[in-house]
Amino acid sequence: MEELHMSTGTHSGFFSSDLLPSLGDRINQATKLRRHIVSPFHPHYRAWEMFLVLLVIYSAWISPFEFAFLSYKQDVLFIFDNIVNSFFAVDIVLTFFVAYLDSQSYLLVDDPKRIAIR
């Protein structure tokens, strides 16, 4: 029994409980983030991501048809494509305000400088 205790004691740092939550804990509990920083687990941000997925599908499906069959963009299509592109531009700006999970500690990083660098 003493050998088993000694062999598990040498690797206790690897299985440390400091990094991961215990089983059954929720990772997306309400955490305090800095002002103007959005959690990537927030339901509104998740809905925004799903909306962007739909816009990507639209762009991937419509763009080849526009290039292949239309010699010029009609007014309605031109306006709608620019609206879609503006949503993508807003997402680029929003990305600078979304926290991310650190790959080493699995903690949300809400430092604006580290978010911008990433």
Image (cartoon, grey):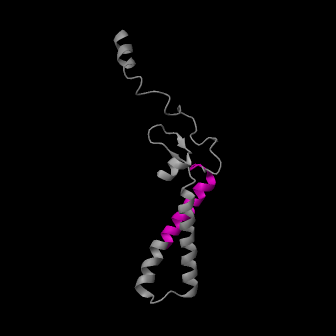
Question: Residue 4: image x %, image y %?
Answer: 36, 15
Which quadrant of the rendered structure holds the N terminus? Answer: top left
Horizontally, is 8 left or right of 115 in the view? left
Residue located at (55% from left, 59% from top) = 49
The answer to whether any part of residue 67 appears in the image is yes
Horizontally, is 27 left or right of 72 in the view? right
Horizontally, is 80 left or right of 7 in the view? right
Residue 33 is drawn in which quadrant? top right
Residue farthest to the bottom, as pictured: 71
Residue 31 highlighted magenta (yes or no) = no
Horizontally, is 31 left or right of 55 in the view? right
Residue located at (57% from left, 87% from top) = 75
Question: Residue 88: image x %, image y %?
Answer: 53, 67
Residue located at (64% from left, 41% from top) = 32
Residue 42 highlighted magenta (yes or no) = yes
Residue located at (60% from left, 55% from top) = 45
Question: Residue 95: image x %, image y %?
Answer: 54, 57
Question: Residue 30: image x %, image y %?
Answer: 64, 42
Asked if 78 appears above or below 35 in the picture, the reply is below
Q: Nearer the viewer, residue 42 or 96?
A: 96
| Highlighted range, magenta | 39-58
How many marks the image carries: the answer is 0
Asked if 56 appears above or below 31 in the picture, the reply is below
